[in-house]
Image (cartoon, helix red, strand yellow):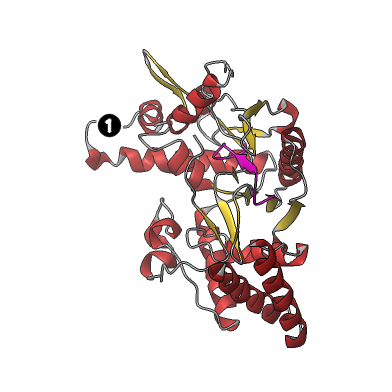
Amino acid sequence: MKVMLKEAESFIRIFYGETNQSEQEMHIRLSEIEQQIVTTGSYEQTIEELAYGAKLAWRNSNKCIGRLFWQSLHVIDKRHIQADVAIFEALLEHIQFATNEGRIRPTITVFSPQNVRIWNHQLIRYAGYETNVGTIGDPDSIAFTKVCQNLGWQGQGGNFDVLPLVIQTSNNPPKLFDIPKEYILEVPIRHPEFEWFEDLQLKWYAVPMISSMKLEVGGISYVAAPFNGWYMGTEIGARNFADDDRYNMLPIIAEYMGLNTKSSASLWKDRALVELNVAVLLSYKEDGVSIVDHHTAAQQFKRFETNEAEAGRDVTGNWAWLVPPVSPATTHIYHKPYNNEKKTPNYLYQPLPY
């Protein structure tokens, strides 16, 4: 109780200070919160407090390079719904609103801090299957795919099968919900010069909607609070498609390019990686889907740092996550240390529900 009261007071002081509300109003609100906590063991945040807290959580996200736009986060308050079907409908609403036919809107949907849990890592993600001939699909999804199969789901066994949503309320068994195809925007990947690139039959979904992290605001943990921005190209081109333990496409692309893969000195991985990222950026932009290249993202982060300095705030950051995985030394981030102090409000990892 004392910890919650302390965290609530810390957040409320930030909220009232940054939104230019009076100290008298702040003290009245702090008294209300203290009374609620003493009486019930918790308190209910206003929609204004929740919305600002979610935005602050983005501003405090040390691993995120896209924090320049923290104030643009659209907050959808769904704390009042408890039924799994209604939660599923709210998630579809989030997907549709955030996708916005490709003009992606940063969005978070916040559910009740009790009795709601979304089992998925992201609202839209591809399945991964272990087979006799190796992994088909996304290796990072193998464990969750098995969970879905144990709950009765059967995929098509392809490289890009969209997993169902798994929703659990209270102590009830989790339920599966298939996402209708019309809600899922995907981008087929092609290259501006290599016609053979389409033969690889690569595609990726438009919006990264993280649903496995909790939103921590003023001592309250919202364990079901899916949120999204838009992709930085390297997240897809240099990680999802390129990592050895993901789709591992670099050897195949290098072979198509006719590169010497027997010697690392030929820099075949580097050359294949650049062309893969060129393809991702071109494809999203041609299809009118929001995406940012890592050079532009780094410039935006520099503006964020300037804005924060002008506001008298220090920028915290996790260098290993902020530095782009392609050509990092060409960005200012590579040459600058960051304090990785964790601030609240924030988005935090939490144990898997399965």
Image x and y of residue 208, in percent? 59, 44
The residue identified by callout 1 is 261
At a point 57% along the width and 21% down the height, the residue shown is: 151
- Please tell me which residue lies in front, 2 or 224: 2
Residue depicted at x 39% and y 30%:
257
Chain part drawn in magenta: 111-123
The single residue placed furthest to the top in the displayed view is 132
Q: Is residue 25 left or right of residue 154?
A: right
Question: In which quadrant is the N terminus drawn?
Answer: bottom right
Query: Which quadrant of the view contains residue 332?
Result: bottom left
**Does 105 appear above or below 170?**
below
Disc 1 packing (10 Å; few <14; some 14–19; many ≥20): some
Q: Could you tell me if residue 292 is visible in this image?
A: yes
Q: Is residue 238 a member of the stretch shown in magenta? A: no
**Residue name at image x 52 percent, y 20 percent:** 150
Expressed as whole percent of the image width and height from the top left, the position of residue 189 reads 56, 32
Q: Position of residue 115 (x, y in %)?
A: 65, 44
Q: Main secondary structure of the magenta part?
A: loop
Q: Say what amino acid the circle numbered 1 marks.
A: Thr
Q: Is residue 112 magenta?
A: yes
- Identify the secondary structure beneath mark 1: loop
Q: Position of residue 28 (x, y in %)?
A: 76, 80
Which image quadrant for residue 187?
top right
Residue 52 can be seen, yes or no: no
Q: Eyeballing the image, is 175 above or below 49?
A: above
